[in-house]
Image (spheres, helix red, strand yellow):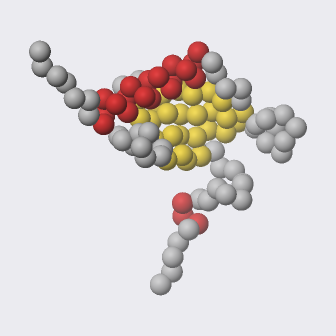
Amino acid sequence: MAQHSQGPVASSQKALMLEMKSLQEEPVEGFKITLVDEADMYNWEVAIFGPPNTHYEGGYFKARIKFPIDYPYSPPAFRFLTKMWHPNIYEVNEIQHHG
């Protein structure tokens, strides 16, 4: 009987499928998660609805999460698609080094 070793892609895809299934079965209030492309488990689209009693109440914010091949051993990249102000969110073109 041949043994099959699970590479990082198979391992991370399985982890992401389990997380996606969990989020679909028990959604987190204020968030909706979908795949950008059904064939790509590594790119998620996130819809965030502004929580009540905050400055973001009534807001609708879109973001993308891109997971690395070696997830969960490396963190995903998170990027807001909706322009917003927050002290810890920077526009990519704002951080420029002049030399």
The residue positioned farthest toward the right in the image shown: 53
Q: Closest to the observer: 12 or 53?
A: 12
Q: Is residue 12 visible?
A: yes
Q: Residue furthest bottom?
A: 99
| Residue 5 position (above or below residue 96) | above
Q: Residue at x 53, y 72 (%)?
A: 96
Q: Locate residue 68 relative to residue 76 in the image: left or right.
A: left
Q: Quadrant of residue 4?
A: top left
Q: Is residue 87 left or right of residue 1?
A: right
User: Where is residue 45 drawn, in percent x and y?
Assistant: 53, 34
Question: The N terminus lies in which quarter of the figure?
Answer: top left
**What residue appears at the point 53 percent right and 40 percent down from the top-left corner?**
64
- Picture coordinates of residue 88 (x, y %)? 67, 57
Q: Is residue 14 left or right of residue 4?
A: right
Instruction: Pinpoint residue 79: horizontal percent, then vertical percent.
Output: 55, 47
Query: Considering depth in this image, is 90 or 5 the residue closer to the camera?
Result: 5
71 sits left or right of 52 in the view = left
Q: Nearer the viewer, residue 42 or 47?
A: 42
Q: Is residue 97 above or below residue 50?
A: below
Write the residue at 65% across / 49% down. Answer: 83
